Image: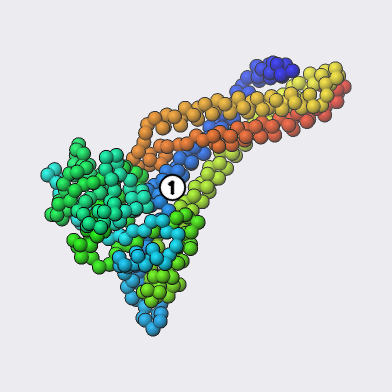
């Protein structure tokens, strides 16, 4: 039976070569649109999220602010500045914290080697900062540890780009760097990463030392900020609210004063980012779907033409005992075959384009977002499902019309 259906389908294609070609071309173009839009949209979404999380993974950066309301007899406008002792207080009173680190910051720090001299933004932090800020060391090096903190060691962790400037074509690990004319030993270099969110420049150009060493050298009394990561994103609001409550109690400000302390919440940003990416995917899917739907109208038109041209043939089949479901199955099969054949060609072309773009390995500018399309199994399944649905709908109505034809009238049709 299937061989007969395929044979009749091929004969129909031969009779309507131009119309069939244009219809399958439209299906091919629609499939191409759906796949490329979804693949590039997915790639952009993934890279956008990767770039944001390059600055921090499920963390909250807490900054001191300025009170904006009177509270407990104190005037507004007071500066809130954190100190190292706040770290221990937060550890003792705020549950469900996995990592916490003080942050000292200083711009315009001079780094000097025998090769070159440069300036950068430097931070004094604790261990665990590398996990929170996705600043993982390259092989052969390491990040700061607790012993570095306790002994106030003069050790230095460098971003990958500043390390290349200071030590061109050399391994920086174990080398000496003069940091504001004080000798430091390089213990690690950051792995290259994508970063779109940042403060005081990208991490690739950053220098990191133990916070205890920083405080000892520069005699800072107040922290620039506090970095916190909950044990799970589920505890985001609980940790944030408890943190505000504890700090409000110590520094005597209204817990509802949003200006007293400022929180850069990466967990919330990640949620918003994922929602935006989902919206973008739905929009691109809608554009591709309607493009493919228009092609499906062409399939339906050609099937109506086929029904009209094969009216006598249908009459003969029904006169010989063919039932309605035989006629319906025949035309639905032909419609699905057109859609899936055109879709297969479109899929192969899409795959070729995506592989071609990936082979370029674009890493700079817009290429780091648009140069990494993702052809996932989900996209393939969605596309095939759409093609099947459109093929079925485009064939079922002409098929029903054909099945309802009266055998006598069909035989008399010219």
Q: Along the line of sight, which residue is nearer the eye, 170 or 388?
A: 170
Q: Quadrant of residue 402?
A: top right
> Where's residue 190, x and y in %?
29, 45
> Where's residue 373, x and y in %?
45, 36
Q: Quadrant of residue 344?
A: top right
Q: Residue at x 73, y 31 (%)?
A: 396
Mark 1 nearby-residue class (10 Å; few <14, some 14–19, many ≥20): many
Q: Residue at x 14, y 54 (%)?
A: 182
Q: Quadrant of residue 326?
A: top right
Residue 144's place in the image compared with 397, above or below, is below
Residue 373's place in the image compared with 188, above or below, is above
Q: Is residue 36 left or right of residue 370?
A: right
> Where's residue 112, x and y in %?
15, 49
Helix, strand or loop for disc 1: helix
Residue 259's place in the image compared with 142, above or below, is below
Q: Along the line of sight, which residue is nearer the eye, 119 or 365?
A: 119
Q: Is residue 110 left or right of residue 299?
A: left
> Where's residue 312, x and y in %?
80, 19
Can the viewer see residue 356 in this picture?
A: yes
Q: Give the colour scheme of this rendering.
A: rainbow
Q: Residue at x 38, y 40 (%)?
A: 368
Q: Along the line of sight, which residue is nearer the eye, 10 or 250?
A: 250
Q: Is residue 42 left or right of residue 250?
A: right
- For disc 1, the marked residue is 49
Q: Residue furthest bottom?
A: 73
Q: Residue at x 55, y 25 (%)?
A: 345
Can the viewer see residue 133 in this picture?
A: no
User: Quarter holding the C terminus?
Assistant: top right
User: Quarter holding the N terminus?
Assistant: top right
């Amino acid at each position: 039976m299937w061989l007969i259906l395929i044979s009749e389908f091929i004969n129909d294609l031969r009779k309507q070569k131009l119309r069939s070609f244009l219809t399958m071309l439209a299906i091919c173009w629609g499939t191409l649109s759906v796949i490329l839009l979804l693949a590039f949209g997915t790639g952009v979404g993934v890279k956008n999220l990767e770039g944001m999380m390059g600055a921090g993974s499920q963390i909250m950066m807490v900054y001191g602010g300025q009170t904006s309301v009177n509270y407990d007899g104190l005037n507004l406008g007071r500066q809130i500045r954190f100190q190292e002792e706040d770290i221990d207080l937060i550890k003792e009173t705020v549950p469900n914290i996995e990592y916490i680190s003080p942050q000292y910051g200083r711009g315009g720090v001079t780094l000097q080697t025998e090769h070159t001299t440069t300036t950068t933004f430097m931070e004094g932090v604790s261990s665990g900062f590398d996990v929170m800020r996705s600043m993982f060391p390259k092989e052969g090096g390491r990040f700061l540890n607790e012993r570095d903190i306790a002994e106030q060691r003069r050790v230095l962790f460098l971003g990958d780009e500043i390390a290349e400037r200071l030590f061109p074509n050399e391994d920086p690990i174990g080398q000496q760097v003069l940091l504001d004319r004080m000798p430091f030993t390089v213990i690690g270099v950051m792995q290259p990463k994508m970063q779109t969110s940042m403060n005081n420049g990208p991490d690739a150009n950053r220098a990191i030392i133990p916070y205890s060493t920083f405080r000892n050298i520069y005699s800072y009394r107040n922290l620039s900020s506090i970095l916190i990561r909950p044990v799970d994103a589920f505890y985001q609001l609980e940790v944030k609210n408890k943190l505000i409550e504890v700090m409000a109690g110590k520094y005597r400000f209204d817990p509802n004063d949003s200006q007293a302390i400022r929180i850069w919440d990466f967990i919330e940003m990640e949620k918003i980012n994922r929602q935006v990416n989902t919206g973008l995917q739905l929009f691109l899917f809608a554009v591709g779907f309607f493009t493919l739907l228009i092609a499906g109208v062409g399939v339906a038109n050609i099937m109506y033409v086929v029904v009209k041209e094969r009216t006598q043939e249908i009459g003969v089949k029904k006169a010989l005992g063919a039932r309605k479901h035989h006629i319906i199955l025949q035309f639905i099969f032909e419609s699905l075959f057109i859609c899936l054949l055109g879709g297969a060609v479109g899929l192969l072309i899409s795959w070729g384009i995506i592989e071609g773009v990936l082979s370029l390995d674009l890493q700079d500018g817009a290429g780091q977002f648009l140069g990494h399309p993702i052809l996932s199994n989900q996209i393939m399944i969605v596309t095939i499902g759409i093609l099947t649905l459109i093929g079925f709908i485009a064939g079922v109505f002409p098929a029903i019309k054909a099945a309802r034809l009266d055998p006598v009238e069909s035989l008399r049709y010219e």
